[in-house]
Amino acid sequence: MTDLPHKSTTSNSLLGPPQTVPLPRASAGLQLPTTMPQKLNSKSGSSGSATGNPRNKCALKPGYSLMSWIRLCNSGADLSGTNGRVVPVTRSELAQHNKVTDAWMAIRGRVFNVTRYMEFHPGGVDELLRGVGRDATALFDEVHAWVNYPQLLGKCYIGPLKENAPGPLTAADPLTIDTRDSKPVEIVPRFDWIQQRSELTLFFYTRSFTNPGLFVRRKDSQQLVARVLLENSGHTFDFQLAGKVEWPPKAVRVGAETGKIELVLAKEEPSPWTSYGTHTSRKLDSLDIQEETYEYEVLEANDFNQDSFELSLQSVQKEILMVLPVGHHLNIQVPVDGDVIQRSYTPVDHNYLQTETNSLASSVCLHFLIKRYTNGPVSSYLHRLQPGSRVHLSSPRGGFMLSELTANRNILLLAAGSGLTPILSLIPHLLKRNTNRIESLHLFYFNKTEADIWLREKLQNLQAQDERFNCTHILSQAEEQPQRISSELLAPLFKEKQPDRCTYAAICGPSPFNTAAVDVLKSLNVMPNQMHVFRG
């Protein structure tokens, strides 16, 4: 984008234990809750144990742990009771299976046979029985909507609920989340915490594929503000911690797929705390958030190639940490001729930079690759900045919906020039995705000449590391066989009845390129809901 654990009070637990357990080949897919919803605008605290880890859940019989359930799922046992067939289920049929010994339930238009799961449910059989024989979507969303139920109950899948069947499935189809007939559920992040002797971890749970962002501002060694950024809102948590913590955080992990956020803080004095402290929470409208700006200063500024440069920024007081949702951007504002103008840029991971950065400092820094245009006022201004110079940044923004890609296993990425930066945020997420695992990810990267290509070696290394990823460079001014985007170029990826036919395309580049790409895709019968154009 350019110029152009603690004391838990869970009682309504529907699925899964209050911990994260690695699954075979799918370690990040199952994130399970530990707390009840918390009221907004309310003051809360915790009086958990010194280690912050007691759990309120039903005692499971020996041999009925989550790992035992995973082993049962992988044993080949017919947990659905259909011998591998996908069978549509009517609501009247569903209602007949409402006993402990014969228990079916529907979640978002999918029907599962949970009979064998009954004794594995940490919330107890009675709790799970609340949802059997009916559509349990509302109950599921009320308790812990972020749970990756397709992975947990995948082997129990019977078929679509007939009245809102999402389309034909075969036994070979992976189970994916379908929300076309589900009413939108307001997502209120749920807070949790655990501690070790030397560190405190704050958790915020949203929902699978919510693609949250995180904004943290440190006030002092015991006070900080954490804001979870969602599609149309932000939820702010004002913390008064029980003890002093160091800054910046030891680690920050934001799960775009799981919707789980972890903020790990080192204690100034290692010792067990009886509580994390207290916090208040409130909801902010996205319009209010977008009016905010933050003052940042230049940490590093170095040329990247003949017409591009690297820019690393940190907040002036080093008190702000910002993690953008995947595919989102922010605006950099600069003064030009007595006016303030802005342009949109997508931060990149510091590993894409040529300049070495301190790994700890990078957690509170934002890094950019920026193409310099001769007549571009913002890029020219930024290119002249020296370390210590200041600019203003907006809050994260963007219309990209990560959930739109969930059902697609073969995806095309079209990037032109500096339009590569939002695409870079997509690639690692898609290749690591556990739900409906990616089969092929094609990147067509358009530039004028070889010298204009960004990160060629890193893209080649990624292609060598993962056979599902393929990068093709298209040069409009190549000495031999110059090419531009065309239907002939993309047609092989969209052949009908081709097993690995691409079913989704993400596009980013200058406006003329974006327009041409959309026109080409339409000529190949790609529907508007099968593509996304990143716009600043």
Image (spheres, rainbow, N blue to C red):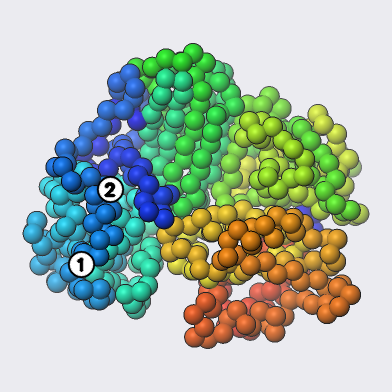
Residue 448 visible in rendering: yes
The crowd level at tag 2 (other Cα within 10 Å; few <14, some 14-19, many 20+) is some
Query: Residue 470 at x, y = what percent?
Result: 63, 67
**The residue tagged with tag 2: helix, strand or loop?**
helix
**Of helix, strand and loop, which one carries label 1?**
loop
Which disc number belongs to residue 67?
2
Q: Quadrant of residue 384?
A: top right
In the foreground, 410 or 337: 410
Q: Are marks 2 and 1 in contact (CB under 8 Å)?
A: no
**Disc 1 residue crowd, few under 14, some 14–19, many 20+, Cα 10 Å:** some
**Drawn side of residue 472 relative to residue 162, left or right:** right
Q: CA distance from mark 2 to mark 1?
A: 18 Å
Answer left or right for 66 relative to 220.
Answer: left
- Residue drawn at point x = 52 percent, y = 16 percent: 268
Q: Position of residue 423 (x, y in %)?
A: 64, 58
Residue type indicated by callout 1: Asp
Q: Is residue 313 left or right of residue 301?
A: left
Q: Amino acid at mark 2?
A: Met
- The residue under label 1 is 78
Q: Residue at x 68, y 83 (%)?
A: 487
**Which sits earlier in the primary sequence, circle 2 or circle 1?**
2
Q: Is residue 40 depicted above or below 166 in this figure?
A: above
Looking at the picture, does residue 513 appear above or below residue 250?
below
* Residue 84 drawn above or below residue 419: below
Q: x%, y% of residue 75?
A: 25, 61
